Amino acid sequence: MLLGPPLLGALLAAAVKPYRRFVGWTNALLSLFSLGAAVVLWRHVLAGDVLTSGPGEFLRADALSTLLALCVSLVGALAAWLGPGMGGDDGYDGAQARRFRIFANLFTLMMLFAVVSNNVGFMWIAIEATTITSAMLIPLHVTKESVEASWKYILIGSVGIALAFGGTVLGYFDFVNLAGHREAALNWTVLMASAPRLHPQVIQLAFVFILVGYGTKAGLAPMHTWLPDAHSEAPAPLSAMMSGVLLAVALYAVIRWEAVVNAAVGTKFTDDLFIAMGLLSLAIGAFSLVIQRNYKRMLAYSSIEHTGLICVGLALGPLGTFAAMLHLLNHALAKSTMFFLAGRVLHRYRTTEIRGVSGLLTAMPWTGGLFAAGMLAVIGLPPFGLFISEFALFRAGFAVGRPWLMGLVLALLAVAFVSMIGHLNRMLYGAPAAGVAVGEGNAWPLVPLGLCVAALVVLGLTLPAPLRALLTRIVEIAGS
Amino acid sequence: MDSVFSQLSVMGSSLVLIFGLILLWRRGVTAYISAFTWQSAVLSGVTALVAYFGHDHELYWVAVALFLLKAVVIPRLLRRMERRFAAERELEPYVNTATSLVISGLLVLFGYAITRPLVAVSQLPTRAAMPLAMGLVLVSLFVIVSRKKALTQVIGFLMLENGLALLAVLGTYGIPLIVELGVFLDVLMGFLVMQIFIYQIHETFESIDVEQLNRLRH
């Protein structure tokens, strides 16, 4: 149920040539089925089940998979509804819309497959496939910039992910030495069961490869260099999917391995690595925000900053993991909304320069308003969900006795805060440049985006019980 | 018996590594493609060797698939691209040949250092060759970051994959067949997409020199 709809959507889009509008609509409806399946999964997991299926427990969904499946199918649905080829003038022709529909569906499919695969080998294959499918979409409009961005993305992404494969091989090597060849030896459950007896040095070496490899895809510094280029040059729906959930899926893979390593050598080793990489990403993200002149790149650097924050959270004990997972959900909602809105702004102003955009509130009052709200959410102000998760993260940090670390993180967040507020001001106020039409235009895409912002406000005011239960179960799985 | 196997695996792996080093001191993509083809053929031979001595019949299939994919199909596609861009040669890498060779020597040593726990833990007769595979992984990474032509970077990436495949077969006698097949599929798809992008780079920039890819900064 979860994996079927995107597969059908991709096949349909590939079969119908030339592109017709009904493909987009069918695709959008199918995406709701995936989302529904993820919600059903949520209910099952809360009832205490772990769903498995296929030969040798090939697919397996626990609480962690469920959270990721929810995020992916939600952002996938947004992309399906707001993507090219739904009618109206959206700046894409039929061939581009067809290509988008094929590869965006495959991209969603691979991300969903990665999070419900029990076999860490297949998880790797799926994540590698996300690189390939999403890279095909970056140069939807062929320009020098988009070609450059896609080349950097596929090369750095593939090399990174190849290193993660090296880590997977080393982990498997450790297991084979211990228990010999077994049919399901790459299954995460089997690895977990034998983790306490794994050789510490070997599994540590494996984890370094895993962290560098999947960290490249997650946008952790210093392997983040592809990210701002790819996010800023990709079409808006793809940027939303990459920033909102692709980074999260890569982190998911790291968390799966973290659980194995923690069971083998204790938490200190992974904690130290997470803090080092997280802080570096936060710092690079925050200071790059100061000098940004391009609002899509600004959002991309903000993603690096938030990934760093999640990474630090993972190192702060059970409370920190709880906060990090909540932050992951909030960030998926907020950042994908922002990229869709940025796409609308770009479509109207025809520039990605912050300087070129002024009077957003006059030219597009609703888009501008949502953009402002989303931006305030992204920088972590109340009453939005990200404020709550950042607050929880700080509490966790003080609880485990790391006040200095928290002070440093707070200072970096303040840098990001100040610079993004400044950029936002420049975009919202003033008079729109001559030649920029005033008025919303096609306004219905704002409805789902408005709902996302509303959901962020809800998450900022309360933590619904089902979500709390889900996150509590995840903390048990991650074992930190 | 085991010592013959051990020596053969070390010899095969050394050959695989040496073909990787050719990228550092030869100029011209043609030489790189031949080096890659031979490297893949030897890698496939090492895989078959492990299949024979390790009595693992699945690995024969992996060896055959590896040979077809990396020693026949991909080199053929690479040659076709090379003919398209015949006028372009790898002239000056970011790091000159002498320095490159010294750095690679150090990287191979580093490979030995970080694989020490692996060699100490393993009981397999192939364990002595594992540092060579790690060395190839590191040298390929260095090739990717120090070369300017998109095509050379792709060959570096393919060699990185070869290094990892060698590590897998030496250390574990091969990962499960079904996963291996998925990996092959990914390698092929990834390579095809890279190929598309190289053609796009050539069309939009009229060269495949990645130094020109500098429009996106900060």
Image (cartoon, coloured by chain):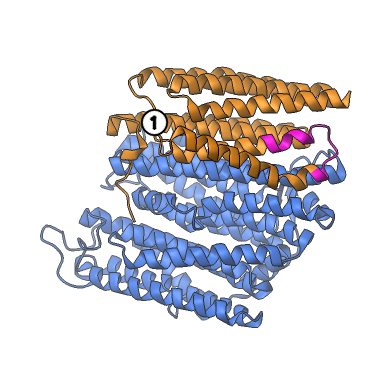
Chain colours: A blue, B orange
Amino acid under label 1? Ile
B67 relative to A467, above or below: above
A227 relative to B97, above or below: below
Quadrant including the N terminus of chain B: top right
Q: Residue at x 35, y 76 (%)?
A: A418
Say left or right for A155 vs A60: left
Q: Residue at x 37, y 32 (%)?
A: B92
Magenta part mainly helix, strand or loop? helix
Furthest residue to the right? B1
Look at the image and give the residue range highlighted in magenta: B120-132
Give the chain of mark 1: B
Neighbours of disc 1 within 10 Å: few (<14), some (14-19), many (20+): many
Residue B127: x %, y % from top left:
78, 36
A338 drawn magenta: no
The answer to whether residue A3 is visible is no
Q: Which residue position holds label 1?
A: B198
Say left or right for A327 vs A320: left
